[in-house]
Each structure stands twice: as C-alpha cells, then as structure tokens.
Image: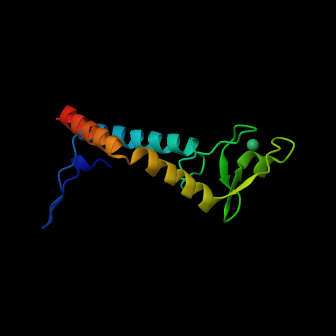
Amino acid sequence: MNLRSTSLTGSFSVPNLPSDRVQARFKAQRQKSEQTRKKNKNTGGRTPKYLLSSLLKCAVCGGHFIMSNARDYACGTHKDRGDHVCSNNLKVRRTLVEDKILEGIKHDLLTPDALALFKREIARLTTEKK
Ligand SMILES: [Zn+2]
C-alpha cells in the first residue's frame, strides 16, 4: 500500500511522511548502529564486572587474569583450558591486588606535581576543543 497516494476523509490528520532523503538518512544511521552493535558483540562487548578483570596478565602464558571464584583473580587460560595449556595455578585475592594497585596509583599519580600537570592538560585540551 502506498500511503502517499491514499486518500483519507474524516476529521483526523495524517502526519507528513518523511522525505526520501530523511528516510535514507534514518536507514543509514540504523545500519551504522547495527554495525557498531555487531562489532562490540564480536569483541565481547561486555564491560568487566571487576576493576582489574582482563587488565592483569599471566606471567606464564600471557593470558588475562579473571575472577576464578567470588574472591580471587586467576589465569583465565589455566581456569578454562587446564594445566596442560598454562601451568600457572596462582590465585590472588581480589581485595589485596586492587588495594595494592590503587595505593600505587594514589602514591604515584596524586602528587602535587602530577595534579598540576593534570590540570594543565585539561586546560590545554579544553582550549583545543573550542
Ligand atoms: Zn596463564
């Protein structure tokens, strides 16, 4: 049914149908969104639940450390594929490793000099965007 050629009678109105150009733009945006969604899906697309998930690397196989249970990070390769693929059976308490890393970040990055540099960079980036 071609809505543009349909004649309507009565006391109601039909909103203007979008032009072909608007429809084409809407279709392009929808396709782009779909591609982005598929791309994110292919890379996992999931936000890690824990602070350091996938940021810690196994020293034996180079795989990611992931939560192996409710309390500990461990090599995901060892956990999922076994001892014959990665022999690293080390488990690290999540609270311990997160506290130590955050302590290091605070110590190294939250100094007066680092904060001054941060403020200068923010000012520079803000100025560049204008
Ligand atoms: Zn490993």
Q: Does residue 82 lie above or below 28 as drawn? A: below
Using residue 48 as the reference point, say whether residue 113 is left or right of it.
left
Quarter of the figure that contains the C terminus: top left
Q: Where is ligand 1, by quadrant?
A: top right
Q: Where is residue 74 shown, x and y percent of the image? A: 71, 52
Count of numbered circles in the view: 0
Report whether 61 appears left or right of 41.
Answer: right
Point 76% across, 38% down: residue:
60
The answer to whether any part of residue 80 appears in the image is: yes
The residue at 45%/44% (across/down) is 108
Q: Position of residue 97 (x, y in %)?
A: 61, 55
Residue 93 placed where, x, y %?
67, 60
Say whether residue 47 is visible.
Answer: no
Closer-to-camera residue (58/46): 58
- Farthest residue toward the top? 128
Closer-to-camera residue (27/64): 64
